[in-house]
Image (tube, helix red, strand yellow):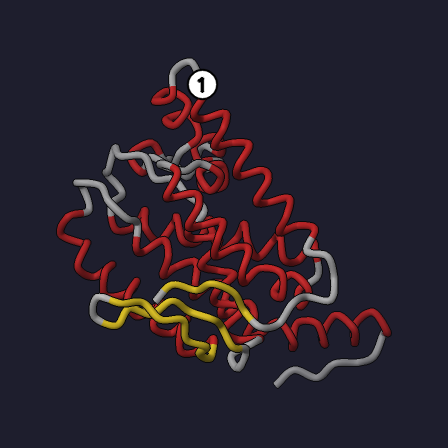
Amino acid sequence: MFPLRDNHKSRRFPLVTVLLILVNIYVFFRELTAPDTESFINSYSLIPYNVNFSELSTLTPFITSQFLHAGFLHIISNMWFLRIFADNAEEKFGHFNFLVVYIVSGATGGFLQYLFSPDSRLPMLGASGAVAGVLGAYLVFFPHHKVETLVPYGLFMSVVSIPASVMLIYWFIIQFFSGVGSIAAAQTGGVAFWAHVGGFVTGFLIAKFYPRFSMFLKITTKGSPINFR
């Protein structure tokens, strides 16, 4: 199943979403036009073997790698999903919080992928983990939104309007079992499915507990007493 559009447009201009798409395109252009593309990728991508948690400089790729892509199909697919699902999530979180969720989801997804192959010397790159976090949040906030989806029927394709919950849960299940199947081939490269899983779960959990967090902030700013139990 491939999403084409959702049926609920944001009432606010998705400033951060647009900026993220533009930044990803710009970095991809820099990547393509770099004098030494391989060196450029190795400098900013996440290479598990190079990670040293006692050296901050080796941890920045958990963020910088989110803005690199392995090819045109890679960046187009990531930006397409971001375009469809991010505007509503950004409206719900607010601009700054949405950006934080995006970056944290991407970093968490990268960390989970790292745990499965900490000795790998292969570069990990892409916005997939961060975008997956947006999808996880969307599932929490808008499960009943309809998504026009391209669905294959044998040799033919049909556009079907389905609930976002159906499409996103299906997507997550595919990523999870693909991740399980990729464990044995962790050193040979390919799609970082665990980054997708980690990012999705992160976005889902943040969105799930976000209303309570927001309520806590409102209460504390008013100076009202709080009882924890």
Q: Give the residue at the far top of this rendering.
A: 35
Task: Look at 34% across and 73% down and name the residue there.
Answer: 170
Residue furthest toward the front? 156
Q: Quadrant of the N terminus?
A: bottom left
Tag 1: amino acid: Ala
Q: Position of residue 85 (x, y in %)?
A: 54, 63
Residue 191 spot, x, y in % from top left: 28, 48
Which residue does the image show at 65% across and 82% down from the upper left? 228
Q: Work out whether residue 194 or residue 153 is closer to the camera in this orientation and state it.
A: 153
Residue 122, image quadrant: top left
Q: Would you call the spot at circle 1 few (<14 residues within 10 Å), some (14-19), or many (20 or more)?
A: few
In front of the other: 193 or 48: 193
Please indicate whether residue 91 sits to the left or right of residue 219 in the image. Answer: left
Kind of element beneath mark 1: loop
Q: Nearer the viewer, residue 165 or 44?
A: 165
Which quadrant of the structure image shows residue 150?
Answer: bottom left
The location of residue 10, given as percent across then percent down, is 68, 66
Q: Which residue is mark 1?
A: 34
Residue at 48 percent of width and 53 percent of height: 80
Classify 8 as above or below 19: below
Residue that sits furthest to the left in the current view: 184
Q: Against 122, is 95 above or below?
A: below
Task: Determine the residue positioned at 62% across, 61% down.
Answer: 87
Residue 79, x across and y down, in percent: 49, 49
